[in-house]
Image (spheres, rainbow, N blue to C red):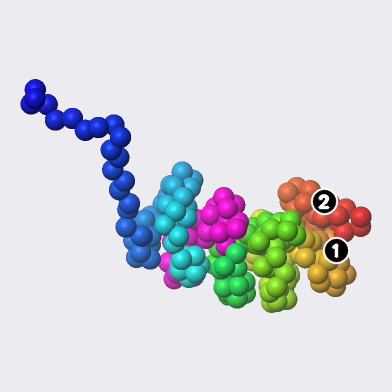
Amino acid sequence: MNGRFTISQSVFFTFKLPKMTDDELIQKIANTIGKLKVLELGRILTEQQFNLRDLIDITFHPDKPLAFRAAWLLENMFLKDADVFTDNLDYLILRFPEVTNPGCQRHYAKILMHATEEKDTSPVKQKLNSLDLEPVVEQLFDWMINPKVKIAVKVFAGWALLNLRQRYPWITDELPAQLQFLMRNGTAAIQTAGRKMMKELSS
């Protein structure tokens, strides 16, 4: 023995962090965070199988900036792995009409836009097809009509509605009028998006 303590390379130590609680997550997003922090938190929550219903609830927190960060986190987790949401889509759809926070509206509309453009064979799309989406469609139209809703929300809402027109054919009759109204005095962004959507509707 030379007195030196050695550990065989074949021995590994695995440290598993305790599952994050709702309060701990709230503390982590209570102050301004950047994109890298959002991505890292999303990775951790996915690995720990964090209850997404709890995250959805946090997007309705009375502290609007905190709720916005929770919605931002929710969207990024969806974009990273949409299938993770399959078992919680019913709850997200249930609470969708309750979204009034302007910052959260953007992320919820974007999630719906991406969810509705998923392939029919995807678990997310199959789950959506089993749910009643009429309250969501009505909310999306309300956001497009409401002058106080931000343009980005209206654009995402428009694309989500466009994706749902096969399931709800009456969307094809209602959406063009809303797009034309928005394009009449709209920004360059809404003009571009509106023309693309109108082209899709006429094809």
Q: In the image, 187: left or right of 148?
A: right
Q: Residue at x 60, y 68 (%)?
A: 89
Residue found at x 60% / y 72%: 90
State the extent of the magenta-drawn residues as a range. 59-85
Tell me the amino acid under the disc marked 2.
Answer: Lys
Q: Which mark is residue 196?
A: 2
Q: Is residue 114 magenta?
A: no
Is 134 positioned to the left or the right of 109 in the image?
A: right
Percent across and percent down for residue 29 are 40, 57
Quarter placement of the N terminus: top left
Per the image, label 2 sits on a secondary structure element best described as: helix
Residue at mark 1: 176
What whole-number distance in Å separates the C-alpha atoms at marks 1 and 2? Answer: 11 Å
Examine the image and state in which quarter residue 148 appears. bottom right
- Quick check: 202 left or right of 92? right
Q: Is residue 135 above or below residue 34?
A: below
Type of the residue with mark 1: Pro
Q: Main secondary structure of the magenta part?
A: helix
Between 102 and 107, the one nearer to me in the picture: 107
Say few, some or many: other residues with alpha carbon within 10 Å of mark 1 (under 14 / 14 to 19 / 20 or more).
some
